[in-house]
Image (spheres, helix red, strand yellow):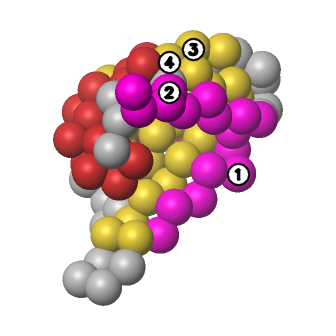
Amino acid sequence: MSEQDMESMLIEENISLMLDGNAMAGLLHELFDVEMTIASVECGNCGRQGEMGSLWAFMESPGYILRCPGCQNIILRLTVTPHQIFLDARGAAYLRIPKRI
């Protein structure tokens, strides 16, 4: 099996595990206390702009991952432990969070 075939299989497997970003709505709301699926985000890799709800969500790993649907760059990593929440959003050029009114 060629390296390209293996990469194609991995991409297909990832897509089968993928949900849309709305799957993380409850967790993000708990963390930020606002509706995060409508928050604007720009991918730091390809420049794609959209709402958090349009990102690809992977929730099968020890943490949660949101990826850009344009280039599959990891936009956000989130891990919840009994005492802490770890948030890594370095894959985003920006994240515009709506202000709670």
Q: Are marks 4 and 2 in contact (CB under 8 Å)?
A: no
Residue bearing mark 2:
98
How far is the residue under mark 3 from the one under mark 2? 14 Å
Q: Are marks 2 and 1 in contact (CB under 8 Å)?
A: no
Disc 2: CA contacts within 10 A as few (<14), some (14-19) or many (>=20):
some
Residue bearing mark 4:
51
Vertical arrangement, residue 76 with respect to residue 12, above or below:
below
Secondary structure of residue under mark 2:
loop
Task: State which mark lies toward you, 4 or 2.
Answer: 2
Q: Are marks 4 and 3 in contact (CB under 8 Å)?
A: yes
On the image, the x and y values in percent for residue 44 come to: 77, 34
- Which stretch is magenta? 86-101
Disc 3: CA contacts within 10 A as few (<14), some (14-19) or many (>=20):
some
Check if residue 89 falls in the magenta segment: yes
Vertical arrangement, residue 26 with respect to residue 79, above or below:
above
Examine the rendering and report whether any part of residue 96 can be seen: yes
